[in-house]
Every structure is written in C-alpha cells, then in structure tokens.
Image (tube, grey):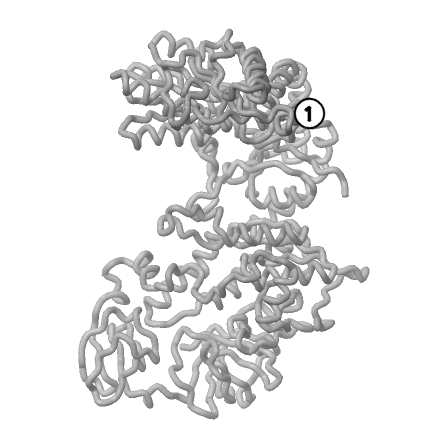
C-alpha cells in the first residue's frame, strides 16, 4: 500500500514527536499530580502548567497570566463570546455580540446562544472573497456591542481578515475584539503586540498537540465571565482541574509553531500554489474560492464544476488522498457550507468544493499524488453527477 | 454453503470489487463480512435516503446510529465506508410516489420502488463510478447466474420486493445472506463480533416514524386533500352506513376503524377515490380470482397468455397458481386458480415459477 496523502491538516494534525515526548512525564508517575495540590506531586504538575503558560504567552505576544486553557477552540470561542456578553450585561453594558457570517460554527453558535440568553446577535456579511464587510462592521459597532468576533483566518477558504484594522476600530469604539486564530496561529504571524485583540482563541490539535486542549488569551480578566462553574482554577474564569499533559503539549507545540511559522508558511505556500497551478491545468474550469484576497498559506478551497464534494471525497479517499469538502449535510440535502454561501458562491459550485490543507509533514509528493489521481477522479465523478443530477 | 453463482470475478480470475449497501443492520453487516471472507475487494456504503429533520430534533441525521453502526462494522472488517447522499432522488422516486399512491386510493409498497429506483439503480451508478463489478445487499433472496430466487429462509424471503429491478442488474448482484436463515445470519454476526449482531429487526417503512404513515401523508398533502377528508362509508349495494376518516387511512381487507353491529364483521373491500368512498362488505366479498398488473417488469423473457405462473399478491402471502390471461404493453391480466383474499391496488403482484425463481411482477391496479 502506498503512503496515504493527508491534505486535511486544517481538520487536525498528528501529535508531533517532540510534543508527545514532553507530555509523557505528566501522564506517568513522575508528574501526574494535581497542580492545585500543595505537595511535591502538585508542584511538579504546577511547574509544567506555568511553563506552558509562559510558552503560549510568548508565542502569541501576550503575558502568562493572560492565558486561560480550555478544552479547545470551540470552548475558547464560547468563553470569549458568551463570557464577554455576560460580563457586559452584568455591568449594565450592551448585551449584544457581533460575529461575521463566515465564523467557525463555534463562534456563530456562541453568538446564537447569547441571543437565547436574551441578548442580541448581529451577523456581518462578507465580500465575495470572504472579508468582513467594513461598512457593516462600522455600523454594528455604533449600536453598542459587548464583543465583536472575527476570525483571523477562515478555516474553509483561508481568507485572512484585516484583524489589525478591526481591532483598532473596536478599541476606538470601546468594544472588545475577539479573534479565533485557530487556523492562523503557526501559519501567519499572530501577535497581540501587533494586533490589539482583547481575546484570542487558539487550539492545540491544529499545530501538533493532541485534541482536547486550547487556550483563550484574555487581556483583561474582568472582561469575561465564566461560562462553566467550579473551583477557583484559572482565576475562576475556567475552573476545573487543569489538563496538565494537554497544557504541557500546547506549550511545546505553540513554541514550535511560533518559531517555525515563517519558514513553514513559505514552504506551504509553495506547495499550495503548486497544487493550485496543476489543478487548474487539469481542470481549467475549476474555481479557487477566496482567491481575490490574501489567504493563509496552507489552505486552498476549490470548486470543480459538475461534481459533488461527497463523491469527490469518496473517490479521492479510495485513491489514497484525504481532504475535506466545502459542503455540509443539513436537514436531508447536501448544501454548500455556510462560509461559501456567505461569500455568494453559487450553489452548484458550493456543493462541488474541496478543501486541501497542508501541514508540516506535507511534501511535493503529496501534490503529485493529488494531481496524478485527480483527472480520473474528476472524470468519474462528473459522469456520476451527470447521471444522478440530471 | 455459498453456491458458485455468487462468484463475480474479473477476467483474470481475481475476485472483483463489490459495493455493499450497509444499512447498519445485521443482515447487510453479515453480507459485507461474508464477502470480505470470500476475498472480494469490498467497499461499504450507507445510503442516506431521507432526513427525519425536525421530527427527531435532538438527533442530527448525519450521526444517526445506523450510519455509525455501519461505519463500526466496516472498520472492524477493514474496508472503506462512505455515506451516499441520495435524499433528493429517494424523495422524488419513493416518498413522493408513496404519497401520490395513497392520494389516489392505493396502498403502495415503497420498498419495491426503493429497490427498483434507489438500491438497484442509483446505488449501481455509484458502483459503476467506483469501478465495482458487483453490488451486494443484505436481502433474503438469492441471485444466481443472472436469475433471482426466493431466499432460503421462507420467513424472511424478500424476493417479493425485488420484481422491479432491471434484469441486467441481476447478473451483477450478490446476495450473501440469501442462502442463510436469519438465525444463521445472527450467529455469523456474533461469531464475527459485529456490533450489529443483536440489533432488533426493522419492520417499519424506514422513512415513516412510529409506523404512522398518515403523519407522512399529512406532511406532504394539503390539509384539505380528499384522501385525508372524511367521506361516505358505503356497502357494496350502495347503502351509506356512516362516515370514514379519509380514505388514505384504509386498506383493502382492513377491519379496524369500521363500525360494528351488522351481524357479521365488515371489511374494506374497495376504495373509490374519485367519489371519496370507502366500500365495505362481508369477509367473503374480499376474495377474487382476477389480478390486473401495470408497470410490469420481467426478469425473464416476457411470458405470454396461457403461461402458468405462481402469483403472490402480498408480502408473506402464499403464492397461488394462475394463468396469464392477457398481456398488452406493460400490463398483464392474471386469472388465479383459487380465490385470493384482499387483492389491493398498489400492492405488488409477483410472479414465480415452480422452482421459486422470480419471473417478474407489477403493481396491482
């Protein structure tokens, strides 16, 4: 069996060997302790947590005491959006949140939860390239807002949002700015020294740490109220005994991601561009979604007219290529993803979208495999779709 | 136990590639397992045919237990597994027809159309695209040398539902559990340690929640649809004896929902949709010798008037001998040698020969 080609790194990545090695002591007898315990076992675990906090803070240009560990990106987004909305409500401020239409479902669902709690959600339109509509953003801020959330890099198409500008406008308007940097971190420069984010989400498993660990960077702890309740861990913002091995893993992975970002980005951009060049040569009527704007280097989202994503994924998987689709199943039919829909991608292209996402283990051989199998796969799926959708 | 007829090979003698329809139930799980054991290159696929949507709000359809079960079985067998989204086509070919048939006073069998249009046509399109030599299902029926036969387990035999499939498809069908009894299938599943081994039998129509088909009709038909509107309950002599609750709620041979006090039990003997009437009569009035079929499909060379066949007019009913009385286009008239009870328009009239070979069938008119 030939080597499988994994081009779904935006979905998740394998744990890096150096990360695995670093976290192992915290699973075993050496440092398994509860970091809140006063004894030596607790101290050993606490040391791991604190070191990881420093590593994460340094990697994103924040202070160690601004790092709140969570179970991942989804929880970080929920804590940021719901937590900031609740804090605003409790001090008599606006119980209103603003999110872009192309946020990860975590951000959109959190905004929706605010509405369920009696608050208000404002969903901002995006341009054809996926950038948040500037005038709509300005208009929304004027209405009084607790937190505005716009992701740094879109997970489906890779669009980079003008976060620095958005953050500045939020600062000027006295609104907290949250950015989901889950896909950005490690792929584009992410630093709170450059961008005045109040809140920033990152996730471990996109950068070689295990699933189940992430962090929310909280510039000012008073700005956020806890959404789960328990002991006093992590300033009470995110109680619960810390996931020490995960935290240690995130620390190492974040340090590596920040250190390697520039070089990795250059390499992945080359690979991604090469894939797009070859793909467009094979399928001249393919459409790269979001090509008009600056994109993160590791993602390409391409629609192949006359096909459907699900069939493409199946045929690619059988040919040894793992990627993902730009569509989602919603109440019985396959529909284009909310991101492509918000960008105005026509339905027939939206249901025919594939996302290839590169990671640190990706090579030119992966690109070659895709381009080798693609002509036949596209031909097969096109004839299938012609029969099934006529 | 497996006959040679199950072998679908490539010209070079290798066992071919097979796309197995895995519903997440025990039968198709075992079908997949047997094919793997026999050395086929097996790909599993679960057809997603409909969505409960709002009626089961806490269970997103994409994580339906049945799909998860199929995935687990495929993983255990070491084969790939995919979900095929055929909701739109199934909705059109099967559910819409189901509703339309009830609306015109018939009692349809959606499983027949699902086999004809979905499982043995659309699924085959996928199989072709995947360069599969054959498709397999967990049906209790036997495909052998291009012919279809009743399954060995007569209690489970599903050949009745298969009359509508294209004759050319039969050559490419594998029916690994057709020669097993249900008990043997379960035993095989247990032995293989499949998670589906103890799963309960599904006897309902898959897209009808809680066996309540009227609720499906209510969703798809306008509230004032004649089929759902009360109308006269008349006897065979034309006497109005009451009101029915909408003729779509009745099936020929039904006793439920009918008034008593007439000396002997009453049964539905006919439905007259054009007059919104449900006709009732005595049990003896349910028996008939004549069956007319439309949309007839042959799995053999078409038979001709005078030919003798075995005719089955309901799932699980006994087949009776009969003669082809007339044939024109896709319509066939049959004369039965003995009377059959409750011949219901919309059900299938399925024809067999004396060796239990499925010859063809049609929709009873």
* Residue A359 at least partly seen: no
- In front of the other: B355 or B297: B355
| Residue A214 sits above or below residue B34 on the image | above
Q: Residue at x 30, y 22 (%)?
A: A96
Q: Residue at x 36, y 25 (%)?
A: A82
Mark 1 residue crowding within 10 angstroms, few (<14) / some (14–19) / many (20+): few
**Residue A89, image quadrant:** top left
Image position, residue B24 (x, y; %):
54, 57
Image position, residue A137 (x, y; %):
37, 18
Image position, residue A105 (x, y; %):
44, 32
Q: Residue at x 52, y 60 (%)?
A: B118
Q: Residue furthest right?
A: B12
Residue picked out by circle 1? A21
| Residue B259 sits above or below residue A306 on the image | below
Image position, residue A19 (x, y; %):
65, 24
| Residue B132 sits above or below residue B98 on the image | above
């Amino acid at each position: 069996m030939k080597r499988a080609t994994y081009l779904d790194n935006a979905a998740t990545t394998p744990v890096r060997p150096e990360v695995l090695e670093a976290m192992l002591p915290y699973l075993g007898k050496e440092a398994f302790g509860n970091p809140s315990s006063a004894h030596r076992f607790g101290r050993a675990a606490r040391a791991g947590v604190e070191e990881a906090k420093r590593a994460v803070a340094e990697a994103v240009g924040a202070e160690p005491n601004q790092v709140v560990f969570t179970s991942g990106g989804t929880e970080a987004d929920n804590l940021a959006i719901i937590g900031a909305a609740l804090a605003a409500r409790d001090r008599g401020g606006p119980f209103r949140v603003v999110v872009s239409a192309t946020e990860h479902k975590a951000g959109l669902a959190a905004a929706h939860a605010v509405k369920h709690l009696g608050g208000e959600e404002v969903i901002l339109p995006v341009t054809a390239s996926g950038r948040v509509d500037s005038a709509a953003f300005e208009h929304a801020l004027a209405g009084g807002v607790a937190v505005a959330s716009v992701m740094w890099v879109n997970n489906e198409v890779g669009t980079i949002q003008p976060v620095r500008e958005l953050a500045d406008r939020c600062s000027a308007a006295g609104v907290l700015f949250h950015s989901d940097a889950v896909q950005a971190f490690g792929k584009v420069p992410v630093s709170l020294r450059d961008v005045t984010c109040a809140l920033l989400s990152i996730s471990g498993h996109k950068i070689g740490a295990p699933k189940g660990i992430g962090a929310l960077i909280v510039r000012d702890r008073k700005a956020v109220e806890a959404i789960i309740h328990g002991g006093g861990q992590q300033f009470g913002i995110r109680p619960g005994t810390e996931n020490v091995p995960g935290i240690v893993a995130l620390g190492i992975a974040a340090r590596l991601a920040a250190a390697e970002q520039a070089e990795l980005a250059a390499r992945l951009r080359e690979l991604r561009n090469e894939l797009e060049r070859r793909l467009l040569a094979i399928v001249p009527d393919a459409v790269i979604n979001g090509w008009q704007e600056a994109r993160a280097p590791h993602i390409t989202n391409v629609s192949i007219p006359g096909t459907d994503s699900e069939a493409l994924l199946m045929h690619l998987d059988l040919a040894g290529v793992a990627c993902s689709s730009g569509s989602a199943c919603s109440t019985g039919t396959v529909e284009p993803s909310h991101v492509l829909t918000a960008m105005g991608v026509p339905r027939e292209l939206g249901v025919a979208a594939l996302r290839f996402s590169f990671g640190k283990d990706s090579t030119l051989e992966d690109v070659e495999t895709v381009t080798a199998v693609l002509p036949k796969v596209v031909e097969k799926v096109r004839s299938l779709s012609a029969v099934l959708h006529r | 136990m497996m006959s040679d007829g199950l072998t679908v090979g490539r010209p070079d003698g290798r066992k071919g590639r097979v796309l197995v329809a895995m519903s997440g139930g025990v039968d198709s799980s075992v079908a997949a397992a047997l094919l793997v054991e026999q050395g086929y290159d097996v790909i599993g696929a679960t057809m997603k045919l409909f969505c409960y949507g709002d009626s089961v709000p806490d269970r997103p359809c994409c994580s339906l237990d049945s799909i998860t079960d199929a995935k687990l079985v495929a993983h255990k067998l070491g084969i790939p597994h995919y979900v095929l989204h055929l909701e739109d086509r199934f909705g059109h070919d099967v559910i819409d027809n189901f509703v339309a048939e009830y609306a015109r006073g018939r009692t349809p069998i959606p499983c027949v159309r699902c086999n004809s249009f979905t499982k043995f046509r659309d699924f085959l399109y996928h199989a072709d695209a995947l360069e599969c030599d054959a498709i397999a299902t967990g049906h209790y029926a036997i495909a052998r040398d291009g012919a279809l036969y009743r399954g060995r387990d007569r209690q489970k035999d599903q050949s009745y539902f298969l009359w509508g499939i294209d004759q050319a498809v039969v050559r490419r069908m594998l029916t690994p559990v057709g020669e097993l009894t249900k008990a043997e299938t379960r035993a095989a599943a247990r032995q293989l340690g499949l998670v589906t081994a103890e799963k309960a039998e599904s006897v309902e129509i898959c897209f009808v929640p809680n066996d309540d088909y009227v609720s499906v009709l209510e969703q798809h038909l306008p509230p004032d649809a004649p089929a759902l509107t009360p109308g006269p309950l008349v006897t065979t002599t034309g006497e109005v004896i009451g009101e029915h609750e909408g003729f779509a709620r009745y099936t020929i041979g039904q006793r439920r929902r009918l008034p008593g006090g007439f000396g002997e039990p009453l049964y539905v003997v006919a439905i007259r949709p054009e007059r919104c009437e449900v006709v009732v009569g005595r049990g003896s009035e349910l028996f008939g010798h004549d069956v007319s079929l439309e949309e007839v499909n042959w799995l053999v060379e078409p038979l001709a008037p005078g030919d003798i066949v075995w005719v089955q007019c309901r799932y699980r009913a006994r087949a009776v001998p009969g003669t082809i009385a007339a044939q024109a286009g896709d319509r066939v008239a049959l004369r039965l040698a003995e009377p059959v009870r409750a011949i219901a328009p919309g059900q299938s009239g399925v024809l067999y020969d004396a060796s239990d070979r499925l010859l063809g069938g049609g929709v009873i008119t």
